[in-house]
Image (cartoon, rainbow, N blue to C red):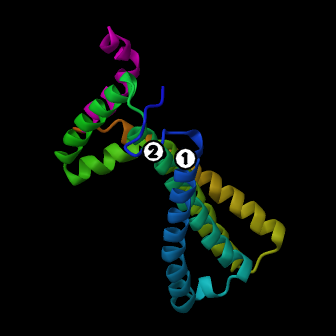
Amino acid sequence: MPARSRGSHSASPHSQYSAAVAGGMRGALSGAAISGPTIYLLHRNVAGFRGLSLPVKTLFGVMAVSASGVWSADRAGLRWDREHYSDRAAQLGRQYASRDERDWAELSSGDKALTWAKDNKFGVVAGSWLASMGGIFAYIHSQPMSFSQKLVQTRVWAQGFTLASLLAMAAITQIPTEGDKILRRREEAGEHSWRDFM
């Protein structure tokens, strides 16, 4: 049940939507601020990138802006949830989160990187696939081949990179780290949360 927020207005789905939209806009602007100069530098310093057509270069920017905007909107919506709901389940969620934050701060940089990769494995695989597709397409686009040959080459290389990223992620998930206790606690929280209500 939604509780009253810190202000005088009650929490509502509309305000959550507004928070998500605002977060998405901030993320999109950040993506544009990063991708714009990056594309400019690549155009000036990398001959292969300079030889790409304008639509292909634009595609890189659009992908970066879109991905950053969607990710930021999702994070803003989740943050709004944590801040504006105060029922028993939300309180327990904040308790788990504060404990996770303390444990996270104690991890080494290497453990943080591995734990983050394990916690975001699908995003990492999807991101590496998108990045490899963009890189492969940019490289093959500059080669003297027919369109059908480029299409076949792109598909073969993309399949190889996808398989490699899946195998790499499977290997990463098997590496023990201190952050595993955080991930294990998150999985067990939903299974045992009913005990905390008793």
- How crowded pointer 2 is (Cα within 10 Å; few <14, some 14-19, many 20+) is rated as some
Amino acid type at mark 2 = Trp
Q: Earlier in the sequence, mark 1 or mark 2?
A: 1
Q: Residue furthest front?
A: 8
Instruction: Examine the residues drawn in magenta and state their main secondary structure.
Output: helix
Residue at the image point whose x is 52% and y is 69% from the top: 31
Q: Position of residue 133 (x, y in %)?
A: 63, 62
Q: Position of residue 108 (x, y in %)?
A: 19, 50
Res 53 seen here? no
| Residue topped by disc 1 | 15
Q: Are marks 1 and 2 in contact (CB under 8 Å)?
A: yes
Residue 185, magenta (yes or no) = yes
Vertical arrangement, residue 161 with respect to residue 78, above or below: below
Q: Which residues are magenta?
A: 179-198
Q: Residue furthest left?
A: 106
The quadrant in which residue 5 appears is top left
Label drawn at residue 172: none
Residue at the image point whose x is 26% and y is 31% from the top: 181
| Residue topped by disc 2 | 80
Residue at the image point whose x is 62% and y is 87% from the top: 50
Res 116 seen here? yes
Task: Decide which of 67, 129 is in the foreground and name it.
Answer: 67
Q: Secondary structure at mark 2?
A: helix
Q: Position of residue 127 (x, y in %)?
A: 53, 55
As measured in the structure, the alpha-carbon distance from the residue carrying label 1 to the one carrying label 2 is: 9 Å
